[in-house]
Image: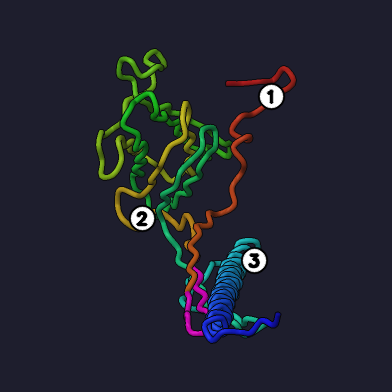
Amino acid sequence: MKQSWQPNQTGQIAVSILLVMSVLVVISFSLASRTTQEINLTTQTTESAYVFNAAESGVNEALAQIYSKLEAGTAVTEVSNIPIVDAEGKASVTYSIDAINQIETRLMEGNSLTIELDPANLTDVNIDWAKEESCTDQASIIVTIYSTVGGETVVSYTPVGVTANGCGHDGDEFDNPTVTNPPDYKYRYTVSGLTTDDLFIRIMPVYNNTNLLVAGAIADRLPIQAYIVESRAINLLGDSQETRALRVVRTKPVAPAILDYVVYTGDSLVK
């Protein structure tokens, strides 16, 4: 007995084929869209990394300029928007160097910050520190002044700290801060009475790490303490015009904190 195709069967087959083709088309478009997105994301990530690295190269160039001048004992020149060449031509890179006569930083417990003094422009020095609310989390500081008297180096220490009851170090007999609650900080100690014999100040936090701001009581009377380096790189590829900016602070070379502790040998120690 012969079987024959009916029109409705033919229509069903056609509809099934169309449905399968539609599904395949949707899948193809979905895969193509996802692939395009992944390519775009990869491109953006690559370009972003390149621009960031280009900004880093600007920082490195500026730091190299500062280091070479300091090593040669010459003044570091303040500059603005100095271009550097990007070897691949993918980014526009510039850097700036600004000299500053105050320092704001976060100092780790046991590390030292050095503040240079200018005998020709003496001023009191304000040391602001601590932003923590609880006094048990706040640091105390040891302020050390290095001087030259009669051809000999003289070192004087002043421990300054929080001595309120319950802070955990009430019996240390540290000096009290000169001012409480200066702008943005909890405490201020003012180093006053400096003379032309005084060379520099070292500040060391104890008990805790601390935020620190050191500035002359008279603006601009301290010598240059550090350099701010800013580098900016702009993407020259594609339409993103992505910009990366980096900012670092470079202090002058100083002796490490370990040299604050002197080891004596022999039998000729004189206090």
Q: Amino acid at mark 2?
A: Arg
Q: Which residues are magenta?
A: 229-242
**Which residue lies at the image location 25% right of the left edge and 44% below the top edge?**
183
Q: CA distance from mark 2 to mark 1?
A: 36 Å
Residue type beneath disc 1: Tyr
Q: Is label 3 in a helix, a strand or a loop? A: helix
Residue 158 relative to residue 12: left or right? left
Mark 2 Cα shell of 10 Å, populated few (<14), some (14-19), many (≥20) = some
- Residue found at the far right of this picture: 266
Asked if 58 appears above or below 227 in the picture, the reply is below
Instruction: Farthest residue to the top: give it.
Output: 171
Looking at the image, is 116 positioned above or below residue 160? below
Q: Are marks 3 and 1 in contact (CB under 8 Å)?
A: no
Q: Earlier in the sequence, mark 2 or mark 1?
A: 2
Which residue does the image show at 30% across and 19% down from the upper left?
164
* Magenta span contains residue 236: yes
Name the quadrant containing residue 150.
Answer: top right
Q: Kindly identify the residue that appears in the image at 31 percent across and 40 percent down.
A: 185
Q: Position of residue 92 (x, y in %)?
A: 54, 81
Front position in the image: 228 or 13: 13
Kindly identify which numbered label has been placed on residue 68: 3
Against 216, is 27 above or below?
below
The amino acid on which the numbered mark 3 sits, given as a three-letter code, is: Ser
User: Measured from the top left, where is residue 260 in percent x and y?
Assistant: 59, 33
Q: Say if mark 2 contacts mark 3, CB within 8 Å.
A: no
Given residues 234 and 41, the one toward you in this image is: 41
62 or 136, which is in the foreground? 136
Disc marking residue 221:
2
Colour style of the rendered protein structure: rainbow
Say left or right for 128 vs 270. Answer: left
Q: Residues within 10 Å of mark 1 (few under 14, many from 20)?
A: few
